[in-house]
Amino acid sequence: MTTSGMSVKKLKPVLVTGSVIFWIAVWHFGASAINKRLILKIPLPLETFKEFISQCVTASFWQTVLVSVLHILLGFTAGALLGVLFGFLSEKSGLFKIFSSPIHHLVKTVPVAALIILAWLWIPSSILPSFISFLMVLPIVWSHTSSGIAAIDEKLVEMAHVYSKTDREILFKVKLPLVSPFLRTGCITALSIAWKSGVAAEVISSPTGSLGAMLNGAKTSINYPQVFAVTLAVVLLSVALEKILKFFWKEQKR
C-alpha cells in the first residue's frame, strides 16, 4: 500500500464524518431555500432528528422495526439458501442451467415495483415483503455462487487428490475457501437490495406493524418529519445489517 493510501485509511473516520456533516449542511440550506416557495415544507435536519429520537424512545417503534427486520431476513435467508443450491446445480448440470435460465433472467430484469404489484394479486400483505426480498436475493446469490464454482481451479483439486485428501477435506479446505469470497460479496449486495425492496413492498401493501406501513401512514397524514425520520431509520438499519454481516463473515486475507 502506498503512503498516500495509508494516510487516507488513517483519516477515513474523519473524512466520513466530514462528508456526513457536509451533506447534512447541503440538506439544511437547500431545504431552507426551497421551503420559501413550498406550502408543504421539507423537514430540516434538526426536525427530522428530533422526530427520529422521539420515535426511538417508544416501545412500539422497536416492535415495528423488529417486524420489518424479520420480514426481510426471512426472505433473505430463503433466497440465499436457494440461490446457493441453484448456483451449484447450474454449474453441475447443463440441463438445469438451460431450463432455469429464463426464470433467472426474468427475476433479474422485471422492475421490483411490477413484481410487488403482480405478487400482491395472490400473496397476503403479511407475507409479501418476505417474498419480494426472496425474489431479489435469489438471482444475486445464484449468479455469485455459480461464478465462484466456475472459478475453482481443478488443478488444485487434482493436487489434493494426489496428496490423498478426502472428499470432505477437499470440500472444506479447497473448494469452499475459493467460493466463499464470491458468496460473501453476493450476500452483502443481496442483503442491501433485499432490505430496500422489502420495505418498498411494505409501503405498497402496508402489512400491520411494519416500517413500510408506518411510512405510508405518515405520508397519508402529511406528517413529513415522520416520513423523513422513518426513512432515516430504514437507512441506518440497512447500514447496520450490512455491518453485522461483514463482521461475522470476515473477508479472508490473501
Image (cartoon, grey):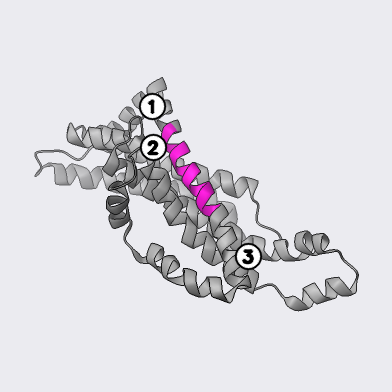
Q: Is residue 188 above or below residue 100?
A: above
Q: Which residue is mark 1?
A: 61
Q: Residue at x 32, y 38 (%)?
A: 212
Kind of residue at disc 2 = Ala
Q: Picture quarter containing residue 199?
A: top left
Secondary structure mostly seen in the magenta stretch: helix
- Give the x, y percent position of residue 66: 45, 32
Q: Residues within 10 Å of mark 1 (few under 14, many from 20)?
A: some
Of tags 3 and 2, the one toward the viewer is 2
SS category of the residue bearing label 1: helix
Task: Say if the magenta span includes residue 71.
Answer: yes
Mark 2 lies on a secondary structure that is helix
Instruction: Give residue 3's mark.
Output: 3
Residues at badges 2 and 1 in contact (C-beta under 8 Å)? yes
Q: Looking at the picture, how far across and down is residue 158, in whole percent?
A: 81, 76
| Residue 63 colored in magenta in the image | no
Q: Considering only order in the chain, which callout, 1 or 2, is on the residue closer to the N terminus?
A: 1
Provide the residue designation for mark 2. Answer: 233
- Residue at the image position 65 percent from the left and 60 percent from the top: 180
Numbered label attached to residue 146: none
Of the pair 229 and 100, the residue shown nearer to us: 100
> Between marks 3 and 1, how big is the CA–CA gap?
46 Å
For the residues labelled 3 and 2, the Cα–Cα distance comes to 37 Å
Residue situated in front as seen by the camera: 131 or 214: 131
**x, y percent for residue 71:** 44, 40
Q: Magenta segment range?
A: 67-80
Q: Nearer the viewer, residue 44 or 161?
A: 161
> Could you tell me the amino acid type at mark 3?
Thr
Residue at the (43%, 41%) spot, across then down: 236
Residue 230 locus on image (x, y percent): 33, 36
Q: SS for tag 3?
A: helix
